[in-house]
Amino acid sequence: MAKPKLHFYRDKLTPKQAAEGMNAAARNAKRLYEDAEVLLKAKRFPTACAVAILSIEESGKLPILREVACMKDKKGPLNDAWRRYSDHRQKTAAWLAIQLIMNGAKTLNDIKQTFDPESMHPDMINIMKQLGFYTDCYGEAEWAEPEGAVDERMATMMLATANLLLPKHETTEHEMKLWVEHIGEHWGKPDMAARAMKFEELLFKEGLRKVPIEDIRAFYGIPE
């Protein structure tokens, strides 16, 4: 008997398809976060921590799907973007950004290490997830159990991070059309931040953003 196999779609996305995927991920991130809250209240700290990390991973799909929507070449950047979508390390990069912001980071330049492919932080959070779910053998044949590896403080911290990363609004097809129009050809180029600023200004004018435009401009480090 042939082994069952899932067929994953890994091609271009229209703005509508990208918005649908982002909203699906956002809903699931919220569901996982709420499950983690229930577990935390029940003092199931290791599982609460691990499920909160799953929520962080789902929230991390949204920026990657924005990238996929901009990609046209399946053989190059598009395939790379989809690989990041499937990579747990890539989807938890925002965890580091939140930690940096909580410690005073205020601009895009302040969190630039988040985008460093050599950063160890995504590995650290993945290890925390594994510790929350599984027993294993470490060091000189020493056995670790989730109950002894993850405490209330760690679980509470991870839930707080997951909550901060939950998407705050539904993504519409219109928003994604504007995103592709303003960012698509400029992805990864020196003027990308300036183009992203124009995109944010347009959303603010249309009432699709609540954050003051001055705060967004300060974050990108772009003067008026």
Image (tube, grey):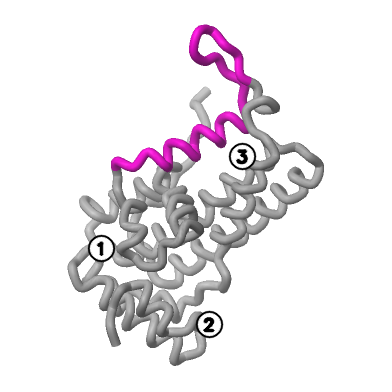
- The residue nearer to you, when weighing 10 against 132, is 132
First-in-chain label (2 vs 3): 3
From the viewer's perspective, is 62 left or right of 167?
left
Q: Which residue is mark 3?
A: 50
In this picture, residue 26 sits left or right of residue 218: right
Magenta extent: 118-144
Mark 3 neighbour density, 10 Å: few (under 14) some (14–19) many (20 or more): many
Residue at 57%, 70% (x, y): give it: 168
Q: Which mark is residue 210?
A: 2
Q: Earlier in the sequence, mark 2 or mark 1?
A: 1
Q: What is the spatial separation of the Cα atoms under label 3 and label 1, in whole angstroms?
A: 35 Å
Disc number for residue 72:
1
Q: Are marks 2 and 1 in contact (CB under 8 Å)?
A: no
- Residue 112 lies in quadrant: bottom left
SS for tag 1? loop
Does residue 82 sit above or below 45 in this rendering? below
Q: In front: 22, or 93?
A: 93
